[in-house]
Image: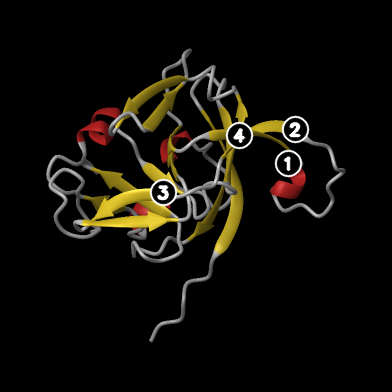
């Protein structure tokens, strides 16, 4: 039996093209390609929404605690395109049009010590206003059965994470086979690697 892969947890900065949208996300690599594992999710979906918007899904382990929006106020200053019975929000910058993330849930305003949130022991205690997801139940269907998780839905568009940050490489994800492909159109089959399902893209 091979030894388990060494994990690495870091905080990454992300933004839209014009820089008006700024966020932080905490990620632990490598991903585990098992839908029941406690792991980040790195995948591409073939549903009409994700295909048309060309979303590259990156989902942190704990959406309510691993993600912060620093600007602008997502509830009032971002565009909000809603899908899936109008409960799924795919936010976009009103200036440049880039979609950085989508949620299923609601926001709450918080004052957070960013250095402490990032794991720094040398924090000076300065707080910053930010927005985070409210924790709560997230219900969805998988393999014909309803699944209830004590969480909320968050998907960060991976291509909006700033390049050249330590431990972050889209190229590496591909080379190591970390990108899963999801069949959300016909809902047949499990996650797979190597090639997308019908209507999906690499």
Residue placed most toward the observer, 91 or 173: 91
Q: Residue furthest bottom?
A: 1
First-in-chain label (2 vs 4): 4
Left or right: 67, with 141 as reference point: right
Residue placed most toward the observer, 164 or 99: 99
Label 4 sits on a secondary structure element that is: strand
Above or below residue 156? Residue 11 is below
The CA span between labels 3 and 4 is 17 Å
First-in-chain label (1 vs 2): 1
Tell me where residue 165 appears, x and y as whole percent: 58, 44
The CA span between labels 1 and 3 is 27 Å
Q: What is the number of callouts on the image?
A: 4
Q: Are marks 1 and 3 in contact (CB under 8 Å)?
A: no
Which residue in the structure is indicated by mark 3? Answer: 138
The CA span between labels 1 and 2 is 7 Å
Which residue in the structure is indicated by mark 2? Answer: 128
Q: Are marks 1 and 2 in contact (CB under 8 Å)?
A: yes
- Neighbourhood count class around disc 2 (C-alpha, 10 Å): few under 14, some 14–19, many 20 upward: few
x 40%, y 66%: residue: 37
Q: Are marks 4 and 1 in contact (CB under 8 Å)?
A: no
x 19%, y 56%: residue: 144
First-in-chain label (2 vs 3): 2
Which residue in the structure is indicated by mark 4? Answer: 108
Which residue in the structure is indicated by mark 1? Answer: 114
| Front: mark 2 or 4 | 4
The CA span between labels 2 and 3 is 28 Å
Above or below residue 72? Residue 136 is below
x 52%, y 18%: residue: 18
First-in-chain label (4 vs 1): 4
First-in-chain label (3 vs 4): 4
């Amino acid at each position: 039996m091979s030894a388990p892969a060494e994990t690495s947890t870091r905080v990454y900065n992300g933004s839209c093209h014009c820089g008006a949208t700024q966020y932080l996300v905490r990620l632990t690599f490598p991903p585990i390609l098992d839908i029941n594992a406690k792991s980040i999710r790195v995948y591409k979906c073939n549903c009409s929404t994700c295909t048309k918007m060309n979303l590259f899904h990156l989902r942190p382990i704990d959406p309510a605690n691993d993600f912060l929006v620093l600007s602008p106020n997502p509830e009032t200053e971002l565009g909000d395109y809603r899908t899936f019975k109008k409960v799924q929000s795919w936010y976009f910058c009103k200036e440049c049009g880039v979609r950085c993330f989508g949620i299923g849930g609601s926001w709450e305003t918080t004052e957070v010590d960013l250095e402490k949130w990032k794991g720094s022991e040398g924090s000076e205690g300065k707080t910053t206003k930010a927005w985070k997801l409210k924790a709560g139940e997230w219900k969805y269907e998988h393999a014909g059965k309803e699944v209830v998780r004590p969480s909320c839905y968050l998907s960060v568009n991976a291509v909006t994470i700033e390049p050249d940050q330590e431990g972050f490489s889209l190229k590496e994800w591909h080379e190591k086979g970390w990108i899963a492909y999801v069949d959300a159109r016909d809902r047949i089959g499990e996650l797979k690697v190597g090639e997308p399902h019908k209507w999906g893209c690499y």
